[in-house]
Amino acid sequence: MGEDIDKRDPAVRETIAGRFNRMIPHNQAIGLQVADVAGERIRTTLAYRAEFLGDPEAGLWHTAIGTTAADSTCGLAVFLAIPGLESVATIDLRMDYLRPAVAGRALEIEARCYHVTQCVAFAEATLHQGDRERPTARCTAAFMRTGRSVLA
């Protein structure tokens, strides 16, 4: 896959997303799954695991798990929005925690890249457990465009 790829092609987007997810070790460690990359909004999922609990007695997910998933999902949204196969790096990420993620339920992350400049791309994400109207958190992030190909 070269630099002149068409990122609007659903098959190309699926291939890129699969490779992107496999290249990030912490995505593999937590089991982040790419669910949908067909449209502007990128969706990933994270199945519940007992080791994700930050408060086992209350049955609440540790917030760092959501942050990790949001960072990767926003990064993928940016990577799919910029031309070519340019690497990106997180330079800023803000999480607003609205309610705890609870044990026994998967976490869904929906992200989109909403603005791209020559040097920086901006993304936002919503994290929820099956009800978009009741998010557990919202995220905004900025990513540096490195100008370097991931193929180099």
Image: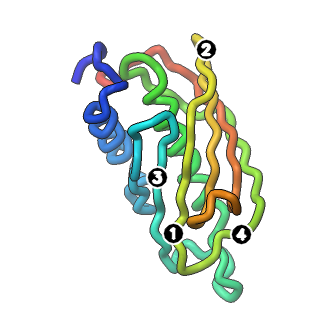
The colour mode here is rainbow
The amino acid beneath tag 1 is Ala
Mark before the other along the chain sequence, 1 or 3: 3
| Callout 2 secondary element | loop
Mark before the other along the chain sequence, 4 or 3: 3
Residue 12 placement (x, y as % from top left): 28, 31
Can you tell which quarter of the image residue 135 is in?
Answer: bottom right
C-alpha separation, residue under disc 4 versus residue under disc 2: 34 Å
Which numbered marker is on residue 44? 3
Mark before the other along the chain sequence, 2 or 3: 3
Residue position marked by numbered label 2 in the rendering: 117
Mark before the other along the chain sequence, 2 or 1: 1
The amino acid beneath tag 4 is Pro
Binning the other alpha carbons within 10 Å of mark 3 as few (below 14), some (14 to 19) or many (20 upward) gives: many
Residue 119 placement (x, y as % from top left): 59, 15
Residue 88 placement (x, y as % from top left): 50, 27
User: How many numbered badges does the structure rendering display?
Assistant: 4
Residue position marked by numbered label 4 in the rendering: 100
Tell me which residue sits at (43%, 57%) in the image.
Answer: 32
C-alpha separation, residue under disc 2 versus residue under disc 1: 34 Å
Q: Nearer the viewer, residue 61 or 42?
A: 42
C-alpha separation, residue under disc 1 versus residue under disc 3: 11 Å
Residue 49 placement (x, y as % from top left): 48, 75
